[in-house]
Image (cartoon, grey):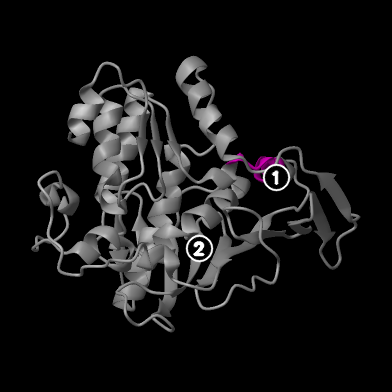
Amino acid sequence: MSHKELIADENVDLVGIATPDHVHGFQAIDAVKAGKPVYCEKPVTHWRQFDLTHQLTQEVEKSKVPLQVGAQGMSDSAWSQMRKLVQDGLIGQPIHAECGYFRVGDWGERGMPIPDPNAQAGPDLDWEAFLADSPKRPFDVSRFFRWRMYEDYSGGPGTDLFPHSLSPVLHILGVGMPGTVVATGGKFRYEEREIPDTFNMLIDFPEKITVAVLGTQGNNYSATGDRGAPGRIPVIRGWEGSLTVKDQEIVFIPAEGSTKEAQKFPIERKESTEWHWQNLFDAARNGTPPISPMALAFKVQTALQMGILAQREGKVAHFDPGAMKIVLG
């Protein structure tokens, strides 16, 4: 059964998308056009599919069909509480933030063992559907089962892990579209794959805020500690002080010269994948806003696509809001 047949089934009320990255966007658009609420695993699109990211955003906005991105760390109330503190002016004018993802191993890319590297597709495997808009090539069992190792289907840490890290930070800051992105990285430990194992980005926003997103799969020490799916605990800096998380509290650290005092705030709710799904059910049933909506994902994915393109080409990526396109220079 194809995804189009599944979506067309009148018994299907809601669609969950957990396919390879490069087909997420096409399947999500088909579901939204059919009026079916969507849970779409991150990333919403592939690193080369900015136009598709924009199209999906427009379809969701036009249809009002709820779409929840599977960045389940957004269910942690710490991020919405920090957003409120920033909006209330606790840190003053935001100026800088950092986040990231650190781990050891490429098990997520290598996937399951393949006993027969020359295995061929069976009659129920639709290789053309798998390829979608990626370059056409003969069936390859490694590409099918270990698709995260290949740049045609995956962006590596930039689109596999960083959506978890960057989504809370952009939610907290309340920024618009990214302005300029630079990025570095490469295959520094796991040479047998196509995508980077180490990736670092600097994102400048028109609001005069820089966000640093750092990560490697060669070492798991994050310095600030880890908190669920987002990985490294973010630090949000403003003219008057900084916000981060320690244990089960949000911590405010005054900046040098500030007259404000250090404060702590208890976190109301931990990350919960069940809550994340329930939030989508509530959105479908009564219009509750998704906590990880397409509008946020558009900003996140655009920044990540800019970073990957910048790193690949050794250039600076700029976002042109008038033309709605990424420009490398």
Residue named by callout 2: 204
Say whether residue 154 is visible.
no
Q: Which mark is residue 49?
A: none
Residue located 17% across and 33% down the image: 1
Chain part drawn in magenta = 75-83
Q: Position of residue 295 (x, y in %)?
A: 44, 39
Where residue 309 sits, quadrant-wise, is bottom left
Residue 80 belongs to magenta span: yes
The image quadrant that residue 94 belongs to is: bottom right
Which residue is at 48% across, 16% downward?
285
Judged from the image, the secondary structure of the residue bearing numbered disc 1 is helix
Query: Pointer 1 and pointer 2: residues touching (CB < 8 Å)?
Result: no
Query: How far across and how far down the image is residue 45, in percent?
Result: 32, 50
Residue type at the position of mark 1? Ala
Is residue 28 shown above or below 122?
above
Residue at which label 1 appears: 78
Q: Is residue 255 above or below residue 57?
A: below
